[in-house]
Amino acid sequence: MAVVHAEVSIWSKPWDHRFHIYGGQVCNTLMAGSWDDRTPLHDAALQGRLLPLRRLLSQGYNVGMATLDGITPLHEACVGGHFTCAKLLLEHGADANAVSFDGVTPLFNACWSGNPALVSLILMYSSVHHPAYLLSSPIHEAAKRGHTACVELLLSHGVNVDMELPSIGTPLYCACESKSTDCVQSLLISGADVQCGRGLDTPLHAASRVGGAKEVELLLEHGADRTSRNSEGKKPLELTTDQSIKHLLQTADGLFDVPWDKKD
């Protein structure tokens, strides 16, 4: 699978909290004066306050008003996982394809929040083939966070299950790194290439490295090559100290080393 070449510096940021998602800046509406260019519309959308949001729109607030970082009220509603607020904004003309300064779209935020109904809503207004998704990919984010229903929705709309981004790999690789078992299983059932990861580092390397025994078992069941070597020349077995994973890999090696005519 050809790697999609795009700069993805946004993925290097540790997003440990929902309000750290935009450019590393704290987006906490309770901190007075932290974002002078934010509007009451942004705050209402983020907090999921439907009635104030409706009132503000009726008062003439611009539904597409963006901050200096390119963040719209729809971005905020999606990162908060607020379906009804997002629906109201879209009905008033909000741009579902709006892209923030860091390359984040409403669909990406909806996948981050893990609300499949919201993802489905955004997909009614946005193409899954938007160029911005090569920078901040919704399916990779959903896979990384174990939001299986969101992943399945994206795949049903034509997203490439094996799309590989240089710094984060494929959705399957992301799911293995985060030990998202259900997501790994769904991706494999959906036809994900068990060998496509991040360059020479396969999903099996990732699962072994992080101690994902269930993920290793699933990958082996779907034909993962336990003898493949990554860019450092290491096999998955050499990347783990987990005894159960070592047993899985060693047992599988033994079974595959036995000639077919001598197997039971």
Image (spheres, grey):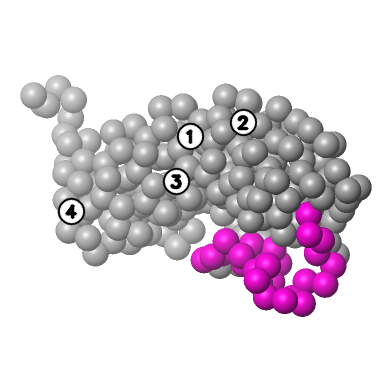
Please state the horizontal and vertical placement of residue 52, each as a whole percent of the image. Answer: 73, 51
Give whichever of 113, 6 is nearer the camera. 113
Q: Separation of disc 1 and disc 3 at Cα?
A: 9 Å
Q: CA distance from mark 4 to mark 1?
A: 29 Å
| Residue 146: assigned label | 3
Q: Would residue 251 appear left or right of 7 to someone viewing this image?
A: left
Q: Which is in the foreground here, disc 4 or disc 1?
A: 1
Kind of residue at disc 4? Ser
Q: Secondary structure at mark 2?
A: helix
- Looking at the image, tell me whether mark 4 or mark 1 is earlier in sequence order: 1
Q: Quadrant of residue 215?
A: top left
Q: Name the residue tied to disc 4.
A: 244
Q: Main secondary structure of the magenta part?
A: loop
For the record, the magenta segment spans: 15-41
Asked if disc 4 and disc 1 are in contact, CB closer than 8 Å, the reply is: no
User: Callout 1, which amino acid?
Assistant: Ala
Report, in whole angstroms, how far the alpha carbon at label 2 lies from the one at label 1.
10 Å
Q: Secondary structure at mark 4?
A: helix
Above or below — where is 215 with respect to 149?
Answer: below
Observer-side mark, 2 or 3, equals: 2
Cα distance in 3D space between marks 4 and 3: 23 Å
State which tag comes first along the sequence, 2 or 1.
2
Q: Position of residue 130 (x, y in %)?
A: 76, 38
Mark 4 or mark 2, which is nearer the start of the sequence?
2
What residue did someone put label 1 on?
A: 149
Say whether residue 189 is left or right of residue 157: left
Q: Is residue 83 left or right of residue 95?
A: left
